[in-house]
Image (cartoon, helix red, strand yellow):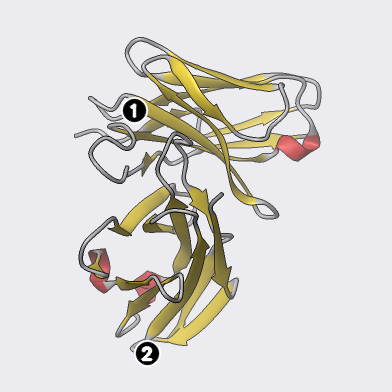
Amino acid sequence: KAGVTQTPRYLIKTRGQQVTLSCSPISGHRSVSWYQQTPGQGLQFLFEYFSETQRNKGNFPGRFSGRQFSNSRSEMNVSTLELGDSALYLCASSLGWGTSGANVLTFGAGSRLTVL
Amino acid sequence: AQSVTQLGSHVSVSEGALVLLRCNYSSSVPPYLFWYVQYPNQGLQLLLKYTTGATLVKGINGFEAEFKKSETSFHLTKPSAHMSDAAEYFCAVYSGGSNYKLTFGKGTLLTVNP
C-alpha cells in the first residue's frame, strides 16, 4: 500500500515568488492535513480538508491557501514568499476524524522549501 | 483548547539505558494522545496512540507510554535504548470535536551514546 507522497521534496525560491506543493494521500483516505515545521515554532497546523471542503485553518496569513480535489489529492500554495516561509511542509492523510474514535495521521516525507 | 508540553528539548542516554521522554497535555475533554518519531529528512511516523481503555499503551520498536489522567501526563519509555532510536520524538493531542487537528509538542531530540 503506497504511503503519502509529497512533491517536490526540495525546492528553492526567492522572496516574492509563489510556490505550489502537492500531496497524494493513501488510497481511500479522504482527509488531508498540512503542517509547517520550523526549528523555532515546531509543528504548526495549516489546514485540513475532507471531501474537497476546508474544515479548519490554522493561524497563518492569507498568503497560505490550499485545496483538495475529488480524488482526495491536495495542493497548498504560498504566494509572495517571505524568508520566514522557509520550512518543511508536511502533508498527512487519514480516513477521517471522530466518527470511529481517534484519528491517526499518516505523514509524507515533506517538501523542504528554502526561500532566498 | 488543547496543548502539549514536552519537558526537555534534548535527552541523551547511553545504549542499553532506560529512555524516558516526558509529555504533559492540557485538554478540556478526555483527550486522544499520540507519540510520533521523526528521523532525519523524513516525515513523522506513529509510535503509539491512546484513545480509551487500557492506560498502558504499547507501540512499535519496544516503546510504551502510560496515560495518567490525574497527572495529565503521557510519558514515553523504552527499557533499553538502541542506537537506532536516535531521532526526534513528538507528543500530540487531539481533543475531539470539530477542530480536526493534532496539536504537537515542541519535540524532544533523543541522542543515544555508544
The chain ID associated with circle 1 is A
- Quarter of the figure that contains the C terminus of chain B: bottom left
Do tags 2 and 1 sit on the same chain?
A: no
Does dot 1 land on a helix, a strand or a loop? Answer: loop
Q: CA distance from mark 2 to mark 1?
A: 38 Å
Q: Are marks 2 and 1 in contact (CB under 8 Å)?
A: no
Q: Amino acid at mark 2?
A: Ala
Q: Which residue is mark 1?
A: A25
Judge from the rendering whether residue A61 lies leftward or rightward of residue B46; answer left or right.
right
Location of residue B5 by image quarter: bottom right
As displayed, is residue B76 above or below residue A61? below
Judge from the rendering whether residue A97 lies leftward or rightward of residue A81; answer left or right.
left
Q: Which residue is mark 2?
A: B17
Place of residue B69 in the rendered image (x, y in percent of width and height, measured from the top left): 39, 70
Judge from the rendering whether residue B35 lies leftward or rightward of residue B24; answer left or right.
left
The chain ID associated with circle 2 is B
User: Looking at the image, which is closer to me, A76 or B82?
Assistant: A76
